[in-house]
């Protein structure tokens, strides 16, 4: 009886892995991307591009349409981020330095965030069958701004990620994307670590 239960449990896990291999692979690549982000390694953009490509499919299947379009943005900004970080390096400066967001830029970014949120919320609420248009629009708009800030190595990008990842965790649990929910829980904690790690580098 115990053996049968163990076999059934193993078969269930195997079946789940087979059915959700795209999401699981994307989650693993995303975790590598995050670790490299915290460590300020330019290779993060390669993994960012790959996991974004996989999540286009995952979010389409789950009807997170704003999140799906966000993955196309991630793919484009991964190329931009690679170029920006590469250009910021010189013989005397091995990596693009971390800087703080000015008050003027923070205001501009807030304006961009609100504009993107309103546009996405309107489209999702009126032209799609998205189950969570407000939450999807909020996390998408915040992630778009945060990713651009990451490409520019602005310290405060991590503060935006803390909020976006925490909210996203709840959304993914609601939609049954459990591997992604676990990933975004780790993302939230790592975003806190990333903030303090990057903050230290400013004072080196």
Image: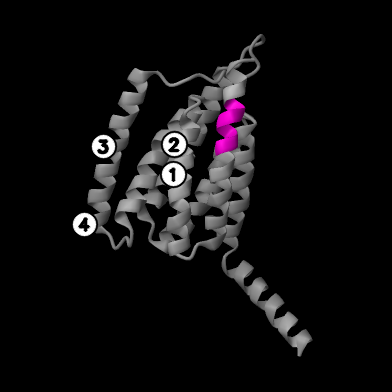
Viewer-nearest of labels 2 and 4?
A: 2
**Which disc number belongs to residue 126?**
4
Give the SS element for disc 2.
Answer: helix
Viewer-nearest of labels 3 and 1?
A: 1
Q: Nearer the viewer, residue 118 or 29?
A: 118
Question: Quick check: 117 left or right of 35?
Answer: left
Where residue 125 sits, quadrant-wise, is: bottom left
Q: Residue furthest bottom?
A: 1
Range shown magenta: 192-198
Which callout, 2 or 3, points at the residue further toward the start of the chain? 3
Which callout, 1 or 4, points at the residue further toward the start of the chain? 4
Residue depicted at 59% across the width and 41% down the height:
190
- The mark tally for this picture is 4
Q: CA distance from mark 4 to mark 3?
A: 17 Å
Q: Which residue is mark 3?
A: 115
The structure's colour scheme is: one colour
Q: Which residue is mark 2?
A: 160
Residue contact between numbered discs 3 and 1, judged by CB atoms under 8 Å: no
Q: Is residue 204 above or below residue 72?
A: above
- Neighbour tally class for label 2: few under 14, some 14-19, many 20 plus, Cα within 10 Å: some
Q: CA distance from mark 2 to mark 3?
A: 16 Å
Residue depicted at 27% across the width and 59% down the height:
128
Residue depicted at 55% across the width and 29% down the height:
82
Give the SS element for disc 4.
Answer: helix
Residue contact between numbered discs 2 and 1, judged by CB atoms under 8 Å: yes
Q: Work out whether residue 151 can be spotted.
A: yes
* Main secondary structure found in the magenta portion: helix
Q: Nearer the viewer, residue 152 or 56?
A: 152
Q: Which residue is mark 1?
A: 164
Residue contact between numbered discs 4 and 3, judged by CB atoms under 8 Å: no
């Amino acid at each position: 009886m115990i053996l049968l239960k163990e076999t059934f449990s193993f078969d269930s896990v195997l079946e789940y892995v087979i059915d959700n291999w795209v999401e699981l692979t994307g989650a693993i690549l995303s975790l590598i991307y995050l670790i490299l982000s915290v460590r300020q390694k330019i290779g993060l953009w390669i993994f960012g591009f790959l996991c974004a490509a996989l999540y286009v499919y995952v979010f389409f299947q789950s009807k997170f349409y704003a999140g799906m379009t966000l993955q196309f943005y991630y793919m484009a900004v991964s190329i931009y981020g690679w170029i920006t970080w590469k250009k910021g390096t010189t013989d005397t400066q091995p990596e693009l330095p971390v800087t703080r967001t000015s008050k003027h830029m923070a205001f501009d970014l807030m304006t961009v965030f609100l504009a993107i949120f309103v546009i996405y919320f309107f489209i999702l609420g009126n032209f799609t069958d998205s189950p969570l248009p407000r939450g999807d629009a909020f996390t998408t708009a915040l992630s778009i701004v945060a990713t651009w800030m990451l490409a520019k190595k602005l310290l405060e990008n991590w503060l935006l990620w803390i909020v976006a990842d925490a909210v996203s965790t709840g959304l993914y649990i609601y939609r049954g994307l459990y591997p992604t929910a676990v990933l975004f829980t780790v993302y939230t904690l790592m975003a806190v670590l990333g903030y303090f790690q990057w903050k230290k580098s400013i004072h080196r």
